[in-house]
Image (tube, grey):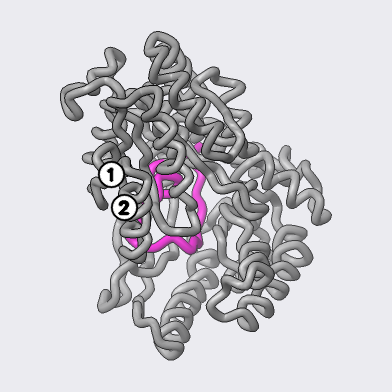
Amino acid sequence: MPLRFLFVTEDKYPPYRADIAVLFGEELAGRGHKIDWLLQAERAGDTPRKAQLGGGTAWIAKMDAGMSRRSRVKKNIYDMWNDLRMFRLVHTNGYDFIQVKDKFFSALLAILIAKIYRVKFVYWLSYPFPEAMLYRVSEKISRYPFFDYVRGHLFKLLLYRIIMPNAAHVFVQSDQMKEDIAAAGISKDKLTPVPMGVSLGRVPYMESGAYNEVHGQDKVVVYLGAMDRVRRIDILITAFRDVLRTVPDAKLYLVGSAFDPVHVEDLRTLAAELGIRESVVFTGFLPMEEAWRHVARATIAVSPFYPTPILRSTSPTKLIEYMAMGKAVVANDHPEQRTVIADSGGGLCVPYNETAFAAGIVELLTNPNRAKSMGLLGRRYVEEHRSYAVLADYVEQHYRELCAGKLY
């Protein structure tokens, strides 16, 4: 029988993250499950409205995108007012459960409604928000340290003492996040990791590795993602200086941009100072399909993930996208990247330093047959474990066990 549930999420309308748009909006909805949504508009000026989304109806809150304190307060008021619809929707629609993702005060409201109407409450956490706020304060990088300090401790209290204990089940982002939350006192039996995946039908895949159609050569290394200073992409440029000593005709493509253009200019300056500016290509921001084409036709891909205590529990999407496109990957030691590389054989896992990244890149550029074999292994791993069709099977099974009372 199809499931019916209300999904209250921090993601904006229209949802663009694949774990929302594809996993729920396409895969689960495509199996006949009816999902109703409470979201907030992405753009300012949109009026509150209803829209059809993923096999159900979305109620969309107005947005105030201003940066002033008054605008932020208004944005939150619009969002909370929209979430109050939960009372009427749960009363009239007979949902199997309410699911809240990455929201705290709305989760408290959902707990109350779930108790009143005797439906199950499910929580979904994609990022350690309280810990991230407190980490920014401790590292003196918070724009509003007092505000983040108070919010961090308040959200931590709500999450681990009220929200998760009152949830019928909790979905988290990774095995590492499961361990971290269990250390905070939540039973492991209550926690299910759902890592990031990919829609295989959307990413380009050329088993023959026809990269020269775009770049005109066969020694291309690609990075896809943000280039903000906190990402520490400078490590790739410094490493590439060492790569060029062994593979002088190699090229590094950096596909993406930064919130602050100065951060990208800093990377350009670094490449010039190291004397490798002609070997580093900055594409700027590209539509996803065009960005993926650069990845699909590269020789190998790199996934540097700056190892902070907060990012240890995340599930890097780019690693899975690279592997879905049949690319051998050089990734640094990070809980999920280490596990995926070990289980798949789809690349090399190296320490987070310039020397190690350079050695890994040279190893694969100078052994193209090995790189191709790794790419094939990575693609097979994604097909079997990380496509959203496979992840939807996994999530659907847990939902059915939850509704049948078989899942704690």
Residue depicted at x 34% and y 35%: 222
* Magenta part of the chain: 1-22
Place of residue 239 in the rendered image (x, y in percent of width and height, measured from the top left): 46, 37
Front in this rendered view, residue 92 or 271: 271
Is residue 380 in view from this perspective? no
Residue depicted at x 79% and y 52%: 186
Label 1 – label 2 distance at C-alpha: 7 Å
Place of residue 206 in the rendered image (x, y in percent of width and height, measured from the top left): 27, 19
Q: Secondary structure at mark 2?
A: helix
Q: Is label 1 in contact with label 2 (beta carbons under 8 Å)? A: yes
Q: What's the residue type where badge 2 is placed?
A: Arg
- Side (left or right) of 38 relative to 42: right
Residue 5 in magenta stretch: yes
Q: Which residue is mark 2?
A: 268
Q: Residue furthest bottom?
A: 70
Q: Secondary structure at mark 1?
A: helix
Q: Which residue is mark 1?
A: 277
